[in-house]
Image (cartoon, rainbow, N blue to C red):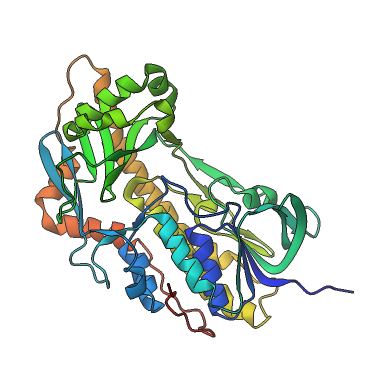
Amino acid sequence: MTVAPEYDCIVAGGGPAGMMAGLLFARAGCRVLVLEKHGDFLRDFRGDTVHPSTLDIFGDLGLLDSFLELPHSRLPRLGGDFGDERVAVADFSRLKARCRFIAMVPQWHLLDFIARVGAQLPGFELRMKAEVTGLVMDGPEGAVRGVTVREQGAERRVTARLVIGADGRHSRVREAAGLPLKEVGVPIDVLWFSLPRPEGEQSADAPEPLVRSRGGRILVTIDRGDYFQCAYVIRKGGAAQVRAAGIEAFRREVAATVPEFAGVVERLEDVDALKLLTVRMDRLERWSRPGLVMIGDGAHAMSPIGGVGINLAVQDAVAAANLFAGPLAEGRLGEVDLEALRRRRAWPARATQALQGLIQNRLLGPILDSREGGEAPPDRAPLPLRIVSAVPWLQRRVGAVVGLGLRPEHPQSPERHRLEPPGG
């Protein structure tokens, strides 16, 4: 006797891609289970950039006004300071979008917002502290029928007509499925840390420069109101050297890069305050097998450059729902050609990675390399950035690529259940 699957769709991973996929599939009438291994969404040093393309998706779903009630700051432009020279890089003010800015929203607020919207749908179920450990398959090369999940110390099987792997760049689902992964070389890593806003310096209406460079050092500073989330860019594999030099040396490096931080770097108590982000870029050559499809970082890990990872992941989720949610809710998905999602979304991922690679290798790499010479490196912005800064049209073009992406998606999946803004 054949036992019916418990769910139409299981989503492995409660990040931006997984939560948006769960929401849209439930909106279309599917019975959806989202499995998230952590007990909450409160993890620091995750991407906070919600781009105009993602804000448009919330607008399409009737949720934009309530989403923008979340604590956030707005970046209508992106730029940087190179020594005493300020350059303008991206201008979102003339985008053909509902919101002509990047919203800086802590990711836990984004995920909690989607969870509260989804909780109002009859087919949406979110389980926290539920870690996906493997796949249920018809043999090593057979179709995927569900997942194995560990909850409260016990492991069990949960079955579904479709499994969506959205469990990030270290995906258990991808590993269990045996999908081939192509690595893309990356020359940098990042050390994340937080610093309080220097005393007497008020958060201005004008956006802070996002990138600061001085003396061959690069520091990204994200304004979170009363503190800055900072990313110190280092050469690939250089974290051990930074830690060996000690926290006092690192404090001097930060203060030399951003002199305004000289009075607050003492708040970095020891090297344990520095959290390493091992930057990697990779992509799947196949995104699916019968009964399974991968999205987000599990399909294509992005560099943090441009903060585009969240937005590409969300667009993967929207495209997956557009292609599969209606047929799945109607029980006619079957052994569908899930390859359609890869055909639609692989090109924007590859092209974005290529652009990130150019920036890493041609702009950031030479700045870091300049410190290795005997003379002090020049504190000038790289020539391409100076050209962009001098031509407003180029700033708008960069703004379109960063803000909207190379193939923005809009929800076209069925709306069998209307989404309502979350209460409370």
Residue 30 rendering spot, x and y as whole percentages: 62, 77
Instruction: Work out whether 373 lies above or below 88.
Output: above
Q: How many marks?
A: 0
Residue 39 visible in the snapshot: yes
Residue 188 rendering spot, x and y as whole percentages: 38, 34
Instruction: Work out whether 166 lies above or below 117.
Output: above
Residue 6 rendering spot, x and y as whole percentages: 74, 71
Q: For residue 331, which quarter of the picture?
A: bottom right
Would residue 4 appear left or right of 27 to someone viewing this image? right
Q: Nearer the viewer, residue 237 or 68?
A: 68
Q: Nearer the viewer, residue 3 or 335?
A: 3
Residue drawn at x 41%, y 74% as measured from the top left: 410
In the displayed image of the protein, which residue is found farthest to the right? 1
User: The N terminus appears in which quarter of the rendering?
Assistant: bottom right
Would residue 271 appear left or right of 164 to someone viewing this image? left
Q: Nearer the viewer, residue 38 or 58?
A: 38
Residue 222 rendering spot, x and y as whole percentages: 28, 47
Q: Nearer the viewer, residue 155 or 53?
A: 155
Residue 348 visible in the snapshot: no
In the displayed image of the protein, which residue is found farthest to the top? 374
Would residue 302 appear left or right of 118 to someone viewing this image? left
User: The C terminus appears in which quarter of the rendering?
Assistant: bottom left
Instruction: Work out whether 417 lies above or below 227.
Output: below
